Image (tube, rainbow, N blue to C red):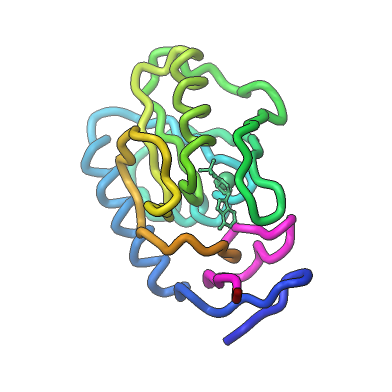
């Protein structure tokens, strides 16, 4: 199945069902690791919105949460210039934080987030990312929880966009070259 988003055609790549299986598995892993301590979950807007909502629903433990917006992508390309849209909204001093993002590509965004949240006093910073592009990754930080490795192609759906379009599909689509 194919969809048109702006000037490009995308083909079905990962089904909603497969995504949901991974989300459930990640939730179980987090639950085991945080059975004694309330984690502080940070949703990285806007891409992680769907993943965050489904993850929260699957987590049967108490957790604090907040939203944080940064951007690095322009069109189909990642840039190294990470910018925060507004200052971090909550006090995370001394807390164990889990950064929840949609996708780790080069890793620039996550590297910025890890160091920023540590500076704000988090006692520990873990990472949960639904997707990971090993072929693009340029950093060496560990990814504590992730759903699946994917190919290097650009994807949309389940919260991920191409220039703000295409977020609202429950499945993941990849661009046709
Ligand atoms: P990084 O800084 O290169 O790791 O890029 C991270 C962010 O760029 C992700 O959180 C996504 O929001 C966005 N991004 C990276 N690859 C894609 C893609 O294939 N489709 C849509 N957004 C992407
Ligand atoms: Mg993102």
- In the image shown, does 88 or 151 lie closer to the viewer? 151
- In the image shown, does 27 or 47 lie closer to the viewer? 47
Residue at position x 42%, y 40% from top? 138
Q: Is residue 135 above or below residue 142?
A: below
Q: Position of residue 93 (x, y in %)?
A: 45, 13
**Number of disc labels:** 0
Residue at position x 38%, y 37% from top? 127
- Is residue 102 found left or right of 144 in the rendered image? right
Residue at position x 30%, y 40% from top? 144
Q: Position of residue 38 (x, y in %)?
A: 35, 30
Residue 143 falls in image quadrant: top left
Q: Position of residue 87 (x, y in %)?
A: 67, 21
Q: Is residue 11 above or below residue 36?
A: below
Q: Residue furthest bottom?
A: 1
Q: Is residue 152 above or below residue 37?
A: below
The stretch in magenta equals 158-175
* Residue 168 within the magenta-colored segment of the rendering: yes
Q: Quadrant of the N terminus?
A: bottom right
Q: Position of residue 62 (x, y in %)?
A: 38, 37
Residue at position x 47%, y 30% from top? 111
Residue 33 falls in image quadrant: top left
The secondary structure that most of the magenta stretch takes on is loop
- In the image shown, does 64 or 82 lie closer to the viewer? 82
Q: Quadrant of the C terminus?
A: bottom right
- Is residue 164 found left or right of 62 in the rendered image? right
* Residue 100 within the magenta-colored segment of the rendering: no
């Amino acid at each position: 199945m194919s969809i048109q988003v702006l000037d490009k055609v995308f083909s079905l790549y990962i089904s909603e069902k497969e995504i949901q299986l991974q989300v459930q598995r990640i939730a179980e892993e987090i639950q085991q690791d945080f059975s004694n301590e309330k984690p502080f979950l940070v949703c990285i807007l806007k891409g992680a919105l769907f993943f965050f909502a489904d993850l929260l629903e699957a987590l049967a433990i108490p957790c604090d949460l907040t939203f944080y917006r940064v951007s690095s992508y322009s069109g189909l390309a990642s840039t190294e210039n990470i910018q925060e849209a507004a200052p971090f909204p909550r006090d995370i001093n001394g807390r164990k934080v889990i950064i929840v993002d949609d996708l780790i590509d080069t890793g620039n965004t996550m590297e910025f987030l890890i160091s920023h949240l540590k500076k704000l006093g988090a006692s520990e910073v873990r990472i949960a990312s639904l997707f990971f592009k090993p072929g693009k990754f340029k950093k060496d930080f560990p990814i504590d929880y992730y759903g699946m490795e994917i190919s290097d192609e650009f994807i949309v759906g389940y919260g991920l966009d191409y220039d703000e379009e295409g977020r609202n599909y429950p499945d993941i689509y990849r661009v046709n070259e």
